[in-house]
Amino acid sequence: MRSTYFAYGSNMNFEQMQTRCPGSVFLMPATLMRWRYFINSDGYAGIKKDDNSETYGCLWQLSEIHWQALDRYEGVREGCYRRSQLNVITGANKTGETVTGYLSNDESYGVPSKPYQSGVLRGAHQVGLPEHYINMLESWEKGYSLDLGK
C-alpha cells in the first residue's frame, strides 16, 4: 500500500531519496501553512507551529518499506523525530490534502553541516521552491534565518 509523504528538508533531494527509498515517486511541490522551518540543535531540519509562517516542500509516494527506511533514517525509535499527520496545500487551485511528515522532537535552534545544507538546497531547487523561500533556507547556513529576523 502506498501513501503520501511531505518532505521539507534533505528528503526533498531527489538523489538522496532514491538512495534512501529506491522506487519512491516524486509527486509535486506542496505548502504547509502555519508551520515554520528551522534547523534543530543536531543540525537537521524541523518544523514547528507558527500562525505567521509557511513551510514549502514536496510530496513523495512511498510504500511501507520506504516508511520503515525513513523511520530508521529519521531516528524515530531513538526519539529524534516522530511521524505526524499534516494538512498541505498543492496545485494552482490550492487543494488541501492530509499527508504524513516527520516532526523534530528537538525544537532548539542549531547550525546545519555543509553537506546537509547543500542537500537541502539542492532538493529545494529540484522541486522548484520559490526563490524567497530558498533564500530563507540559505540563511540557515550560519545558524540563523532571515525569516526569524535574527
Image: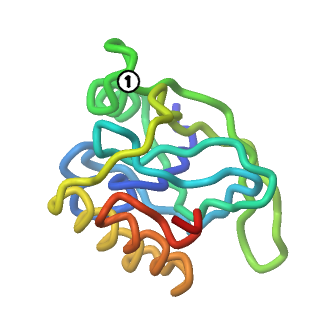
Q: Which residue is mark 1?
A: 80
Viewer-proximal residue, 65 or 129?
129
Name the residue furthest bottom: 131
Residue at 70%, 42% (x, y): give it.
Answer: 49
Residue at 36%, 26% (x, y): give it.
Answer: 71
Viewer-proximal residue, 85 or 54?
54
- For residue 63, what is the image quadrant? top left
Residue at 42%, 56% (x, y): give it.
Answer: 25
Label 1, residues with CA under 10 Å away: few <14, some 14-19, many ≥20: some
62 with respect to 133 (left or right): left
- For residue 88, what is the image quadrant? bottom right
Per the image, label 1 sits on a secondary structure element best described as: loop
Residue 112: x, y in percent? 27, 54
1 with respect to 20 (left or right): right
Say which amino acid is labelled 1.
Cys
Residue 18: x, y in percent? 24, 54
Viewer-proximal residue, 111 or 69?
111
Residue at 52%, 77% (x, y): give it.
Answer: 129
Q: How many marks?
A: 1
Name the residue furthest top: 77
